[in-house]
């Protein structure tokens, strides 16, 4: 998807995520409010400094992290994005991929006040780890109907 969208807030958010670089973490206050809430399967923070810390950790832990936004739906102050996240773990050649979605809420100035990421950490991450992944896949097979 391109960063154009009928809603300029969504277009700005899409452009931001698709072009995000480590150097942008310092300037995230342009996109997030000071009291922004952020939650994903591993983190929950309630301020801009926490959001910056999460994204800084992403760049420190991963090589070539990149979001590709697939769809965007906007209704009022809310935006729902579906995306693919492509990356490599530091020092590993294998490319990895996570498919997920984000629920965003925009403040009156168009910045993000609420950001909740939804993705299956077991399927998209833990199942791909050597030892834990085998155990989780076995449990999953046994629970299938």
Image (spheres, grey):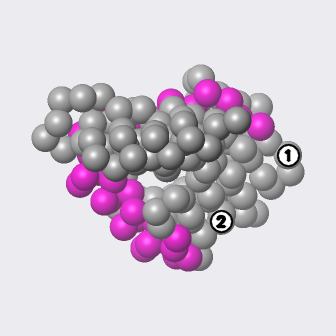
Label 1 secondary element: strand
- 133 above or below 42? above
Q: Residues within 10 Å of mark 2 (few under 14, many from 20)?
A: many
In the displayed image of the protein, which residue is found farthest to the right? 76
CB under 8 Å between callouts 1 and 2? Answer: no
* Percent coordinates x, y for residue 17 in the rendering: 50, 42
In this view of the protein, which residue sits in the foreground, 142 or 76?
142
Q: Can residue 92 be seen here? A: yes
In the picture provided, is 33 more to the left or to the right than 27? Answer: right
Q: Quadrant of residue 12?
A: top right
Secondary structure beneath dot 2 equals: strand
Q: Which residue is mark 2?
A: 113
Mark linked to residue 75: 1
Using the image, tell me which numbered label, if any, was put on residue 136.
none
Span colored in magenta:
44-73
Rendered image quadrant of residue 13 = top right
């Amino acid at each position: 998807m391109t960063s154009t969208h009928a809603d300029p807030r969504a277009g700005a958010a899409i452009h931001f995520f698709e072009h995000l670089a480590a150097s942008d973490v310092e300037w995230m206050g342009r996109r997030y409010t000071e009291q922004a809430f952020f939650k994903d399967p591993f983190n929950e923070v309630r301020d801009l400094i926490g959001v910056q810390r999460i994204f800084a950790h992403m760049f420190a832990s991963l090589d070539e992290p990149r979001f590709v936004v697939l769809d965007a739906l906007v209704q009022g102050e809310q935006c729902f994005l579906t995306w693919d996240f492509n990356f490599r773990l530091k020092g590993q050649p294998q490319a990895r991929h996570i498919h997920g979605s984000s629920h965003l809420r925009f403040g009156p100035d168009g910045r993000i006040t609420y950001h909740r990421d939804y993705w299956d950490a077991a399927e998209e991450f833990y199942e791909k780890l050597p030892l834990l992944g085998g155990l989780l896949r076995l449990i999953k097979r046994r629970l299938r109907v």
